[in-house]
Amino acid sequence: MKGKDFLDTNIFVYSFDKKEPGKQARSRDLIREALNQGGCVSWQVVQEFANVAFKGFQVPFESDMLREYLDSVLLPLCALFPDKDFYKEAVGVQWETRFSWYDSLIVTAAVKLGCTTLFSEDLQHGRIFRGLTIIDPFR
């Protein structure tokens, strides 16, 4: 990682996906690098991951599993909790980028945290917005 990196929810979800071994390995590498080199996520990534872990995994997480993952991975990376101004800024980001509301929240968080890279499979690979480069790590 060259600058501060933000990891989108799909990175964490793929780290548990045995059906996609290449994506699983790449995701685990990104998470390990983020934990060792100051990567970050926002509250939204924590919430989205918990929802998928409880409802979307083939073998859903139990509460103690999520607590352990929160303590060891997600909360150490979680660097942004929103305030009123955050939402106002996200409205502007949504208007400028035409991303969905939830993707705009992710982009806004990454920009506010001063990240240089946003790793996400869901957004426009290579797009640069306010100094933030969106990278699909699975391309």
Image: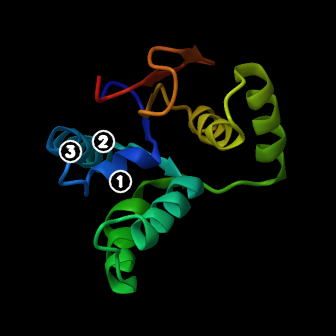
Q: Quadrant of residue 83?
A: bottom right
Where is residue 127 drawn, in percent x and y?
52, 15
63 left or right of 133 in image: left
Q: Which mark is residue 13?
A: 1
Residue denoted by label 3: 20
Where is residue 114 drawn, in percent x and y?
56, 32
* Colour convention of the picture: rainbow
Q: Earlier in the sequence, mark 1 or mark 3?
A: 1
Looking at the image, which is closer to me, 46 or 58? 58
Looking at the rendered structure, the secondary structure element under dot 2 is: helix
Residue denoted by label 2: 37
Q: Residue at x 35, y 83 (%)?
A: 62
Q: Residue at x 32, y 24 (%)?
A: 2
- Please tell me whether mark 3 or mark 2 is closer to you in this view: 3
Q: Residue at x 40, y 67 (%)?
A: 53
Where is residue 8 drawn, in percent x and y?
46, 43
Amino acid type, mark 2 = Gln
